[in-house]
Amino acid sequence: MSWLAVAVALLFAIVLVLSLLVFALARQVGVLHERISPVGALAMNQRLEVGDDAPIVAATELDGTPLMVGEPSAASRSTLLFFLSPTCPVCKTLLPVLKSISSREAGWLDLVLASDGEGHEAFVAEYGLGAHCYVLSRDLGLLYGVGKLPYAVLIDERGRIASFGLVNSREHLESLFEAKERGAGSIQDFLARDQGSGSA
């Protein structure tokens, strides 16, 4: 019985030590989380800068309707131009997010899905994109400096570039709106500007 009592006491001590270690690690994770800056869309573009007039491109919707992309909006609406491809797996995972954002921000935002090539009819039908503006234009991607997908550009109501970047998650998409509200090209630009002003 004495050995059993020693074993139980030893196990109790080990569990107590492990509990303290887990608590300490959880606290460190919380500290690290507070120190990490929010990551927005990666603003990589050699053609565009925030504040530039958006390139105006004559594109064609999938149903053949002509559309001028980048023009100032007479109805004071902004445009989220989202570049995607039927063969891009990350693009497909973001489609439900785009639909949600389009519905939530319908009062001020128009969503334009942009791509080129072939095979889009089946893609639109499979993912239920028929209610959204879907344009086909190779020039659109070239003029907007799109190098990798998925990529998004937020154009304000005056036809100017508000924010842009490579987007891989809901947070990246939301950061485009946040950057527009704060008057920065990206969240990273805003944080860098904020830190610069704080150190001055």
Image (tube, rainbow, N blue to C red):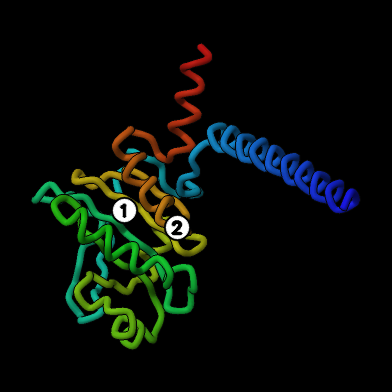
Question: How far apart are labels 1 and 2 at the CA level?
Answer: 26 Å
- Which quarter of the picture shows residue 121? bottom left
Q: Label 1: how many residues lie within 10 Å, few (<14), some (14-19) or many (20+)?
A: some
In the displayed structure, 192 sits above or below 17; it is above
Seen in the image, is 169 located left or right of residue 25? left
Say what secondary structure mark 1 lies in: loop
The residue nearer to you, when weighing 113 against 135, is: 113
Label number found at residue 169:
2
Residue 7 at what x, y percent from top left? Answer: 85, 50
Residue 153 at what x, y percent from top left? Answer: 36, 53
Furthest residue toward top: 200
Seen in the image, is 18 located left or right of residue 90? right
Q: What residue type is labelled 2?
A: Ser
Seen in the image, is 38 located left or right of residue 129? right
Label number found at residue 55:
1
Residue 184 at what x, y percent from top left? Answer: 38, 35
- Which quarter of the picture shows residue 187? top left
The residue nearer to you, when weighing 117 against 152, is: 152
In the displayed structure, 54 sits above or below 83; it is above
Furthest residue toward front: 1
Say what secondary structure mark 2 lies in: loop
Residue 176 at what x, y percent from top left? Answer: 36, 46
- Indicate which label's residue lies in the foreground, 1 or 2: 2
**Sequence-first tag of 1 and 2:** 1
Count the marks.
2
